Image (spheres, rainbow, N blue to C red):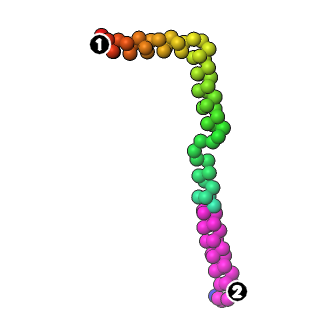
Amino acid sequence: MSHSPLLKASVEAKIRLSGWTDTTVTRMRKRYADRDRGQTAFEYLGIILVVVVIIGAIVGTGIGTTITNKIKDQIGLIKAGK
């Protein structure tokens, strides 16, 4: 069996290149894998929109004053000691 220096150098280069590409690809995957964490501005906008619709429904139907009056009545009962 002949041990050609060219074959040996070629195999060593292939091993080093494979190791380098594996390491590089692994680092890139780690760097960009967690890019989609947390809320986006669009999701926050959706939550705000839902809250505004709920508040608008409460104010528009007049149920807000009913709730406020019931809370005031209950606070009055607590003050009166009943």
- Label 1 neighbourhood size at 10 Å, few (<14), some (14-19), many (20+)? few
The amino acid marked with disc number 1 is Gly
The overriding secondary structure of the stretch rendered in magenta is helix
Range of magenta residues: 2-27
Q: Which mark is residue 46?
A: none
Relative placement, left or right, of 82 versus 74 is: left
* Kind of residue at disc 2: Leu
Q: For the point 32% across and 11% down, which residue is it?
A: 80
Please identify the quadrant where the C terminus is shown: top left
Residue linked to disc 1: 81
Q: Does residue 12 lie above or below 70 as drawn?
A: below
The picture places residue 3, in percent across and down from the top left corner, at: 65, 88
14 is higher (above) or lower (below) than 51? below
> Could you say whether the residue bearing mark 2 is in a helix, strand or loop?
helix
- Where's the N terminus, which quadrant? bottom right
User: What is the x, y in percent for residue 12?
Assistant: 64, 80
**In the image, what residue occupies the spot 69% across and 81% down?**
10
Label 1 element class = loop
In the rendering, which numbered label is found on residue 6? 2
Residue 51 left/right relative to 6: left
Q: Is residue 25 magenta?
A: yes
Q: Residue furthest right?
A: 6
Quarter-wise, where is residue 61 in the image? top right
Q: Residue 52 location, x and y as percent?
A: 61, 25
Left or right of residue 22: residue 74: left
